[in-house]
Image (tube, rainbow, N blue to C red):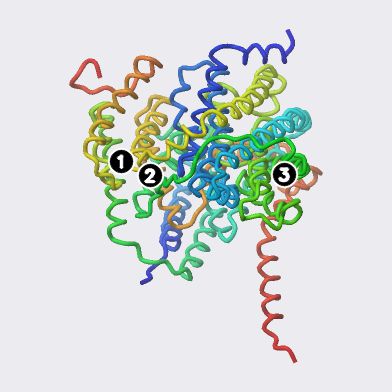
């Protein structure tokens, strides 16, 4: 039996199909609720997957991932509060439509655009991931080192206005992952004589703390709470095809934009939706009406943010390099379930790769049905009081942190990570580089050390390999670019200060 | 009213921790290994710590120029109580098992976060932990920490 048929067999089981449906429903629910988001959603269901088989577990996770990106649009439309940052641009036109009494139609536009974007990006994933994986088989440890550093700097660089904080967060993440046994020499590093520390800091408890617990502490420290005031008729109404025809080019363009942005490290769905929205404002058929309840805005934002879901999995699956915290968590959960993303996944477990592709296709189709039938029910979830919700999040997050290894020390890790995440967020640090740093640390360190063995200890020889050199140049450019931009801004300001004669 | 920004406080703390860790990398325990092209176990961490030292200093200096509004005491209190309660909950799980601390935590936390409906909180505090415990212990067969006093949970 060929790999595709095997993959199809994996997906066409009752447990996998049920997991897809439940995952998508839960994902949409998590997306609808402001403040939870994809990362917390995935960490919340992680403990449920520990006793599941590999493919159903992945199906549940992927359902949550895609569903949550779409779900954010419902609360953005209904209460003008995006459930996830990815849906912020959707509120710009979705809410005015709801105010006009067209919430059901706005949800219809958002649903179709989301499903189209999602399916488009699965196509990109199916085409690009195997190519990238095959290409990366030529990589030596030097290329992997260059790639790891490039990905991390990209993510840190996205923290606009806080690049030093982004870089510092990335360095902290890299450092934290070095604690424990050094796998090359066998020495203990930074354990300070503690036996428990020899296993290092477990990734999942750290993510649980950094995202879920810190979110609860942040909410506790802020007196403003999201109040769900649902004044509109919520439902689902499909826009007629004749209304789609003039918007097909916009839809395609937003899908391409979203898919491209998704493959870049550090950008993510929120960036994609705003870039697509800006592009719509520049070139959409009804660009003058954008911001007043024009479907063009919803189509651009929703197709772009969902187009990120599949394409963001390209570097994650093909290279084992996640592009954002969501894919980092996905990567962590893949590893928990015995799947190590990277080029070897495509040669050794091609059936599972096909299964992931097929799951994503089915998830997007299920998402349409879930959105069409459940928009009204999901909106009711907004009525759950936030303090109750946050309390439940803490409990389930704690189970998730404990369940990975059954080690009580992981609970302490989660709590300390929560405390650290809270302090860092209060100080304006982005958490994404920290998590990505933790994920990439082992790869970057091992490839650096192996690379130095290959080059007999010469750093300069790293620059002799064309792919690595290109990546190093891009990295250097990313590091220098903010300084150039700042200098140009200063020059412009200085020019503006010169009084007219 | 303004005060020292969070960024400068956190930057300063990270700098001090990093300085200590850099000093620690010169401990005798790390000087024995000669593997990996003559580079020992702290070769990579030292690079990171050096970067962290420089960056934390930069964050500290940048933070001095930031103006941060002084937080409202009530908000600090709520966050502190939430953190202490969560910390206590986590520590008590090891001592008293999952179920009992979870019931207590689920009962207290909504009040800390500003929810006051006693009946709802009481219902959630009983039903939710029991449901979670039952699902994981009996359905998914994931063993959660048990209490030293009761055989069942």
Picture quadrant where residue B138 is located: top left
In the rendered image, the residue lying farthest to the top is A1
Please determine whether, in this image, residue B59 is positioned above or below residue A308: below
Please determine whether, in this image, residue A345 is positioned above or below residue A6: below
Residue matched to label 2: A216
Q: Position of residue B146 (x, y in %)?
A: 27, 22
Which residue does the image show at 76% across and 53% down from the upper left?
A283
Q: Is residue B87 left or right of residue B60?
A: left
Please determine whether, in this image, residue A83 is positioned above or below residue B138: below
Q: Residues within 10 Å of mark 2 (few under 14, many from 20)?
A: many
Residue closest to the eye, A99 or A333: A99
**Label 3: chain?**
A
Residue matched to label 3: A254
Which residue does the image show at 32% across and 51% down from the upper left?
B79
Q: Position of residue A141 (x, y in %)?
A: 70, 36
Q: Residues within 10 Å of mark 3 (few under 14, many from 20)?
A: many
Q: Position of residue A408 (x, y in %)?
A: 34, 30
Residue matched to label 1: B86
Q: Quadrant of the N terminus of chain A?
A: top right
Q: Position of residue A316 (x, y in %)?
A: 64, 34
Dot 2 lies on which element? helix
**Label 1: chain?**
B
Q: Is residue A247 left or right of residue A166?
A: right
Mark 1 to mark 3: distance in Å? 43 Å
């Amino acid at each position: 039996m060929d790999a595709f048929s095997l993959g199809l067999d994996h997906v066409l089981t009752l447990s996998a199909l049920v997991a897809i449906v439940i995952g998508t429903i839960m994902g949409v629910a998590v997306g609808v609720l402001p403040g939870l988001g994809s990362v917390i959603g995935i960490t919340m269901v992680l403990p449920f997957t520990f006793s599941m088989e590999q493919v159903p577990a992945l199906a549940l996770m992927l359902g949550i991932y895609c569903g949550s990106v779409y779900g954010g649009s419902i609360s953005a439309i209904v209460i003008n509060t995006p459930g996830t940052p990815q849906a912020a641009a959707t509120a710009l036109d979705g809410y005015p439509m709801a105010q006009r009494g067209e919430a059901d139609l706005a949800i219809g536009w958002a649903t179709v655009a989301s499903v189209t974007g999602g399916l488009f990006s699965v196509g990109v994933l199916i085409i690009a991931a195997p190519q990238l994986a095959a290409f990366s088989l030529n990589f030596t440890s030097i290329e992997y080192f260059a790639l790891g550093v490039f990905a991390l700097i990209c993510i840190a660089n996205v923290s606009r206005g806080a690049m030093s904080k982004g870089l510092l967060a990335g360095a902290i993440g890299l450092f934290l992952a070095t604690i424990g046994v050094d796998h090359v020499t066998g020495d203990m590093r930074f354990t300070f004589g503690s036996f428990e520390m020899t296993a290092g800091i477990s990734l999942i408890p750290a993510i649980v703390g950094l995202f879920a617990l810190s979110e609860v502490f942040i909410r506790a420290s802020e007196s403003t709470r999201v109040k769900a005031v649902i004044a509109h008729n919520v439902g689902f109404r499909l826009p007629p095809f004749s209304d789609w025809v003039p918007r097909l080019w916009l839809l395609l363009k937003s899908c391409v934009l979203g898919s491209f942005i998704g493959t870049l490290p550090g950008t993510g769905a929120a960036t994609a939706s705003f870039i697509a929205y800006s592009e719509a404002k520049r070139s959409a058929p009804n660009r003058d009406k954008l911001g007043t309840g024009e479907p063009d805005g919803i189509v651009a934002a929703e197709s772009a943010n969902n187009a990120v879901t599949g394409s963001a999995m390209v570097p994650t699956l093909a290279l084992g390099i996640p592009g954002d915290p969501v894919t980092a968590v996905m990567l962590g959960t893949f590893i928990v379930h015995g799947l190590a993303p990277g080029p070897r996944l495509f040669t050794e477990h091609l059936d599972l790769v096909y299964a992931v592709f097929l799951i994503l296709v089915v998830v997007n189709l299920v998402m349409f049905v879930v959105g069409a039938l459940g928009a009204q029910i999901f909106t009711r979830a907004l009525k759950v009081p936030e303090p109750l919700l946050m309390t439940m999040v803490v409990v389930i997050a704690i189970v998730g942190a404990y369940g990975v290894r059954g080690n009580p020390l992981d609970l302490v890790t989660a709590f300390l990570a929560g405390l650290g995440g809270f302090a860092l967020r209060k100080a304006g640090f982005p958490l994404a580089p920290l998590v990505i740093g933790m994920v990439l640390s082992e790869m970057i360190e091992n490839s650096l050390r192996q690379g130095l063995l290959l080059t007999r200890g010469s750093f300069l020889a790293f620059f002799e390999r064309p792919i690595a050199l290109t990546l190093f140049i891009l990295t250097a450019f990313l590091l220098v670019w903010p300084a150039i931009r700042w200098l140009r801004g200063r020059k412009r300001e200085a020019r503006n200060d010169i009084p007219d004669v | 009213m303004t005060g020292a920004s969070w960024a400068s406080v956190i930057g300063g703390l990270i700098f001090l921790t990093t300085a200590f860790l850099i000093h620690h990398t010169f401990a005798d325990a790390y000087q024995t290994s000669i593997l990996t092209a003559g580079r020992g176990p702290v070769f990579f961490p030292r690079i990171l710590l050096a970067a962290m030292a420089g960056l934390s200093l930069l964050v500290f200096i940048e933070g001095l120029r930031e103006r941060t509004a002084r937080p409202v005491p009530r908000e600090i209190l709520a966050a502190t109580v939430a953190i202490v309660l969560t910390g206590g909950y986590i520590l008590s799980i090891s001592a008293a098992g999952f179920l009992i601390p979870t019931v207590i935590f689920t009962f207290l936390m909504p009040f800390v976060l500003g929810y006051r409906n006693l009946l709802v909180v009481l219902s959630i505090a009983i039903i939710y932990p029991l449901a979670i415990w039952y699902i994981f212990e009996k359905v998914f067969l994931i063993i959660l920490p048990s209490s030293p006093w009761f055989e069942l949970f």
